[in-house]
Every structure is written in C-alpha cells, then in structure tokens.
Image (spheres, helix red, strand yellow):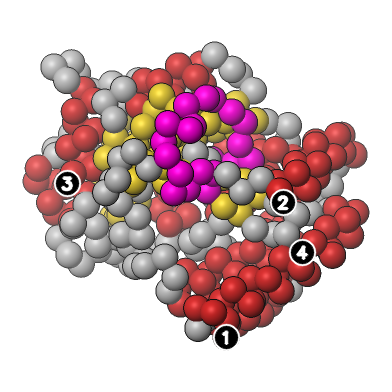
Amino acid sequence: MKTTVIIPNYNGIDYLENCLRSLEGCFGDKPPAFEVCIIDNGSEDGSPEMAERLFPWVRLIRFPENRGFCAAVNEGITRAETPYVFLLNNDTTVDPGCIRRLERRMDNDSRLFSVAVKMLSMRQPDILDGAGDRYNALGWAFAIGKGRPSADYNTPMPVFSACAGAALYRKAYLEKTGLLDELHFAYLEDVDLGYRARIAGYRNSYEPTAKVYHAGSASTGSRYNPFKITHSSRNSIYLIYKNMPFFQLLLNLPFLAAGFFIKTLFFCTKGYAGVYLKGLGKGFKLCLTPEARQRKVRFKPANFGHYITIQLELWINIFRRR
C-alpha cells in the first residue's frame, strides 16, 4: 500500500457513511488498495460506532474529547506506515480513481510536497469548490476557482498550498517540515503547512483528474459564523508571525494593513466586525506566547531564494482571484 486515508471526524453521522461508501467503491472487487483511518474527536452522535459496525476494515482511533482538526490529523499521520497520506474531510465523497491518480502524480515528481484534488460542490457537481489555495500579500487565503465552472479548471497547475480537506501529502517531507500546527486548532493550518513547505523548497500542485465532492461546513456550520470568523482571523495573524521573516514582514506591512482594514469593513456588512476584531486580538496574544515563539520558522540564508519566489507570488496573487 502507498497511501493511508486519514479522516478526522466530529459528530459526522450525516456524512461519514457516504464518505466511507465512496472509498469502498474505489476497491471494486480487489483487495483494499489503501488503508483508511478515522480519528474521532469525541463524537456523541454514534458516528464512530456506525463506522465500526458497517466498515470493519476501517481503523478507528478515538479521542475522549474534541482536540481539533490538527490534533486528529497529526495522530493519523504519526500512525501511518505508508509513504503518502491522504487527508479527507468526513463531508466528502471520493471519485473511484481519485487516490490512484494522486499517487501517480506524486510518483512522477519527487519535489512535490502535496497534491490538491479538484474539489466539487456536492450539490452542484459542475461547480468548483476549490482547486487548491492561494495566499497573497494582503494576508488573505482563498480557494482557487470557488464557485466557478469546473470545466474551467482542467489543467494541472502549481498552487500555494493544498486544501487539507482533500489532498495527498508525502509523509517523508511532512516529517521534515513538521506536521499540522495544533495551535491553529482549525482553519489556515493547511496554508501554514504549504507555506513551510515552500520555504523548504518543496512544491504543491493541483491534479484536475482527481475529483472529490464536498458538502461543506458540516462540522462547524454556515460559511460565516462566530467560531469560523474568530479562528480564521486569529490564525491569519499567527500565520504571518510564524512564517514571515522580518524583511518579508516589512515588505508586506502596507498590504497587510490594507487587507485587515478591508476585511473589517466587509465583516461590518455581515454584522461580525466585533467578532473579527476580537479574533485578530487573540492572534496577537497568541504570538506572544512561548508556544508560538517555539514554532516560528527560523530564517536560514540558504532559503533566501525560496522567500523571494514566495514574495513575488504573494504580490501577484493580489490580482488573482480565480
């Protein structure tokens, strides 16, 4: 086996069975071609029991409480014994050939850190939910092509980071860069991971033939809610602190200030400006903690060229919204 599928689960009774059925469909009449590991975050809805009963071939690891997306995924990565790990949200279904195509792409390029899938809307399969992530000098991360016709994104391309909701990662490189940062708890942890990979000189890419269908916001609710806004804004500050060396922070400071101002105005229109600003405050406080300082990426002169490449991309991505 080349791949371990890692599914973090928290009260996913409405989605998990369909997700596992789709993975089962990848096997056909053949023996399992990959391992599947569910890490349950203290669910109380019977979803882990359902998985044990209906899918005895699945490995189940149970936490007594909700430790967050990052902790669950890291547990799965640590226990995986395969060269690749496929991170997968529980509110997804997988196209039968998806994992095989991702493996082939990874096999053909030893520089790849991760490969993002073509994530499609479960409700409107011809509409893209994301083709990997971009990040720009305004401090904004966004899903490439979200809401656009799927047919417009049929070409492989480099991405800033893969979306950890459905992406294949090379375990050996994860062990070098470090796993998901559990200080994030949830949101932007995949952009942070992709950023660290880019600093180290690895690449992230998008594979359009690998398709996953996504329901969206199954564990945390609607697109805009206090939990998501608080954690996203908090983590946006931490992401910058952690990955940008001083010279890069100076280059981006005017853009970042503009980006946070625009976001504040945007959340004013949604009635969440106070929640957003509170999250930013939590982000600054987090950066002052010993735990955050220990996790900050140390600048190495050998990586200077990688930083320049990243910086040019951050500027270009200000003007690329799709």
Q: Secondary structure at mark 1?
A: helix
Q: Which residues are magenta?
A: 143-163
N-terminal-most mark, 1 or 2:
1
Residue 269 in the image: state x and y as whole percent: 54, 79
Q: How dense is the environment of label 1, judged by Cα within 10 Å: few (below 14), some, or many (20 and up)?
A: some
Residue 177 in the image: state x and y as whole percent: 65, 40
Question: Which residue was labeled with disc 3?
Answer: 17
Q: Residue furthest left?
A: 53
Residue 17 appears in the picture as rendered: yes
Q: How dense is the environment of label 4, judged by Cα within 10 Å: few (below 14), some, or many (20 and up)?
A: many
Find the distance from the CA under tag 3 to the CA under tag 4.
Answer: 42 Å
N-terminal-most mark, 2 or 3:
3
Residue at point 80%, 36% (across, down): 309
Residue 49 in the image: state x and y as whole percent: 14, 54
> What type is the residue that disc 2 sits on?
Ile
Find the distance from the CA under tag 4 to the CA under tag 2.
Answer: 11 Å
Question: Which residue was labeled with disc 1?
Answer: 274
The disc placed on residue 256 is: 4
Compared with 107, 305 (above or below) is: below
Question: Which residue was labeled with disc 2?
Answer: 318
Q: Where is the C terminus found, in terms of image quarters? A: top right
